[in-house]
Image: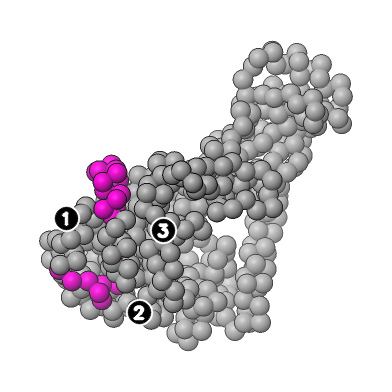
Amino acid sequence: MEGLLRHRNRMVERNRLEYGISYDDINWINYRDALELELERDSLLSDLNDRMRFGYKGTKTDVSRLSPGCKLCAEGQWSCLFINGKCNCKCFYCPAPQNDLGAPVTQTLTFEDPYEYVDYLRQFDFKGVSFSGGEPFLSYERMLRFLKVLRKEFGDQLYIWGYTNGTLVDKKKLKTLADEGLDELRFDIGATHYDLRFVKQALGIIPNVTVEIPAVPDEVDLITKSARELYDQGLSFMNLHQLRLTPYNMDKLMSRGYKVAHGPRATLPESEIAALKVLKNLRAVSADLPVNYCSYVYKNRFQKSGLRHKLAPQTLLEWEDITENGYIRNLSIDLKKYPKAHVELEQAFPAGEKGIQLDNESGRFRFKLEHLSRIPASLPVELGYRDVRISEMPGEIPDFEEVKLQETRKIFIETAFVINDMEILSSLRGMLERIAHGNARPEEWYASDQLFWIAHFEIIEEGLSEYY
């Protein structure tokens, strides 16, 4: 369990750094509370087992009837365009300030020109787009302009949806959006204290109307009641998110007494419990509304992996592979350390074989994972993983690919090693292959820090988060 324990310690230290002097003011979960909440979650999941279907490695439910937009998100085919950064509501759970209209932005890239955004979508072959904010209806004309251009350029090949708190919605705007091809509109009814009038205006106008809100622990009954009322009037979908703590919303969340768990980001286990309770309540009264619980671990694992899978092919070299988690795997042998290895490798690999590279300049023999079993056991193999990111301008990282948008604009895909020259002894080669092919049990790669890191870069972990 060394690998798992070290990982958890890293997560705790990361949170300690993020929250600084406020760290000790946070109601961090203790062992007893964690155990009780996990038992409650297990009981809810057991009750729901025959009434819903988990998917995406057990991080999302109910996946039997997801919104088309949610399916695209899970497949890594979704681009979220933040139309603005300003909101007219003051939700206690909002993770960041929303005070600046700004320019439309996605993945740190600004897009004032809809046609540049069209090029971006085509370059990376996205199949879905959402308009988020802020509150998109504060920039209604801007949103409408993008919608018109996207529908003109892509026809019905692009699924387009929007987000809103509903306070600025009216039937005229809704009809215009529907006429211009908006497929779905998602309402945060928590922002309006569960005033359902705004959602009801969209029913019968927008093809798919969805409620998408955080699962607030002390509002389970309100959420259930609202969902039943809207379902009876034609609501298409309900999406429930797990609340997470940020430095911005910390004081408001802590004033409510919620418990906080560690992880890549600080999250609220009671929010997860609340989402499952809503789902159980709705199934108990035979409400057939599709309810999608979107856990934080789903977002952290699948959304990030999806973006990496979009970017990685732009920088992939012939002897490299893209892992399930979207990182670029690099296997090599340092020939400077083993000068006689040339002879053994030439015998094992005929000239012209694909998926290998002999680089005399750097003194490296590089190869794909499929060739690992043919590498002589006497030669230590070095393993590395590259990450990718997209940026407006190239930074200090020297390795990047240039992507053109329209005639004058360029964006950059940067890549850098996040793990490099990790020595894999011959005794661990089989475990590397088993992890990469999804055949290793977590208990096996929990055993050491090295195996844990390999699993982190190779695979998308299964299951909901453990509370600690």
Q: Determine the secondary structure under disc 3.
A: loop
Of residue 331 and residue 28, the one placed in the foreground of this image is 331
Whether 160 is among the magenta residues is yes
The mark nearer the N terminus, 3 or 2, is 2
Q: Which residue is mark 3?
A: 112
The amino acid on which the numbered mark 3 sits, given as a three-letter code, is Glu
**Residue 458 screen position, x and y as percent:** 59, 43
Q: Is residue 228 visible?
A: no
The amino acid on which the numbered mark 1 sits, given as a three-letter code, is Asp
Distance from disc 3 to disc 2, alpha carbons, whole Å, reads 25 Å
Q: Which residue is mark 2?
A: 89
Distance from disc 2 to disc 1, alpha carbons, whole Å, reads 28 Å
Q: Which mark is residue 179?
A: 1
**Residue 331 screen position, x and y as percent:** 69, 33
Residue at 67 percent of width and 64 percent of height? 9
Residue at 20 percent of width and 54 percent of height? 180
Quarter of the image with the C terminus is bottom right
Identity of the residue furthest to the front in this view: 408
Residue at 82 percent of width and 16 percent of height? 343
The mark nearer the N terminus, 3 or 1, is 3
Q: Is residue 128 visible?
A: yes
The mark nearer the N terminus, 2 or 1, is 2
**Residue 452 screen position, x and y as percent:** 65, 49
On the picture, is 127 further left or further right than 296?
left
3 vs 2, front mark: 3
Q: Is residue 318 above or below residue 208?
A: above
Q: Tell me the magenta residue range.
A: 147-171
Q: Determine the secondary structure under disc 1.
A: helix
Q: Determine the secondary structure under disc 2.
A: loop
Residue at 70 percent of width and 55 percent of height? 2
Distance from disc 3 to disc 1, alpha carbons, whole Å, reads 23 Å
Q: Is residue 272 above or below residue 323?
A: below
